[in-house]
Image (cartoon, rainbow, N blue to C red):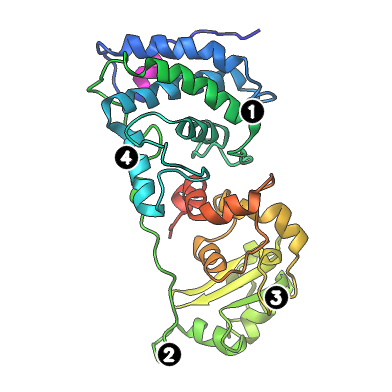
Amino acid sequence: MMKQSKIYMRPWLEIHHRTKKTDTDEWYMGLANELLPLVMTFPLYEGNPDVAEDQRRLALTCALYLEDCVADAGNWREFIHWHKRSYGRYLPFYSLTEDYLPDEINREDIAFLLWTLSSKSSDSCPFNDVENPLDETLLELADVLYERLDAAFESAPISDKLASNWMMDRRLMEKEREPLPEIVPGAALPTDVEHFLEAGKGEPLMFFDSYDALKFFFVHSLKWEDDEETLLPELAEFDNFVVYGNPKGVLVAPDVAKYFAAGNNPLYDAATTEEEAYEMFCEGGLCPFDLLKYGMEHNLLPEAQFPFENGKALLHDNWDFVARWFLREFYEGD
């Protein structure tokens, strides 16, 4: 039995970053509480220890979505128009037809909202797994919620105090994807990069199976001092290294070499890549973003895929958004 089957005003006001109610708040809170029993009948969050909280959050999110749609403003409108400018379509993952109306409510919108709540991304919630945006139960619940929101659309009041950043932080949307640093013939390069390119015969990526092999490369190819303290001893517990040389310097990434299908990579493992490589797009700090970009822009991660049906197409068609959504401050981070 659920400990709480009602949503109270406090979380609604907290999301709106205010303490005083407006005339429209009670109406939207009433809607959220009408939606909650519908949400509770679906097994979308089964097995999650915070299932009750997730269900309440979903009902609140649907109310926030409708509030923005009725006002034709707010963070939801910001998001879909940003996504259209950035990626050429209003939403990731879903095949939108001419029936999709950006100034109204849509089934695909609600399915995507369900995905965002199932595939959490926050500083306080480390990556665990990614939900299938085309999951049958998710789409069924999206249909049910759409019918209820569609029925409420015409009678819903217009709010002039909308919540900000509830869908996606505006600062994250405003982050520009930077072009990869390119090595221009004749341009001055850091000494480490010159030594790297000489050792790798011009290849921008090199691969090492162990820390001992990496140290040998540092000393004998990059000409680093043979001193344990200067040879990145914090990497001693790792293996399967990628080293990426570019005009910024020499970047070292542990535990990801098996995913890169480069011609000079003897460590590449296609089967492991199929199972695990998607985590580089979802777990902050697992793979430096410049290296991830290089891999995608040079087709070195062809077997990377989400662990569900059609997972390869869904990842490759949406990889930049997925990385932005999950990696957050690591997306184009320093």
Number of the front mark, 3 or 1: 1
Mark 2 = which residue?
185
Quarter-of-image position of residue 301: bottom right
Looking at numbered disc 3 in the image, what kind of residue is underneath it? Asn
Residue at the spot 57% in from the left edge and 33% down from the top edge:
118
For the question of whether residue 228 can be seen, the reply is: yes
Number of the front mark, 2 or 1: 1
Mark 1 = which residue?
137
Number of the front mark, 2 or 4: 4
Residue at the spot 44% in from the left edge and 14% down from the top edge:
32
- Nearer-N-terminus badge (4/1): 4
Horizontal and vertical percent position of residue 230? 58, 72
Tell which of 79 and 211 is nearer to you.
79
Quadrant in which the N terminus appears: top right
- Nearer-N-terminus badge (2/1): 1
Residue span colored magenta = 10-14
Q: Secondary structure at mark 2?
A: loop
- Nearer-N-terminus badge (2/4): 4
Q: Is residue 300 depicted above or below 200 in this figure?
A: above
Q: Secondary structure at mark 4?
A: helix
Q: Main secondary structure of the magenta part?
A: helix
Return the residue found at the far bottom: 186
Contact between labelled residues 3 and 4, with CB atoms less than 8 Å apart: no
Mark 4 = which residue?
78
Looking at numbered disc 1 in the image, what kind of residue is underneath it? Thr
Looking at numbered disc 2 in the image, what kind of residue is underneath it? Pro
- Distance between the alpha carbons at the discs numbered 3 and 1: 41 Å
Residue 238 is one of the magenta-drawn residues: no
- Distance between the alpha carbons at the discs numbered 2 and 3: 24 Å
Q: Secondary structure at mark 3?
A: loop
Mark 3 = which residue?
265
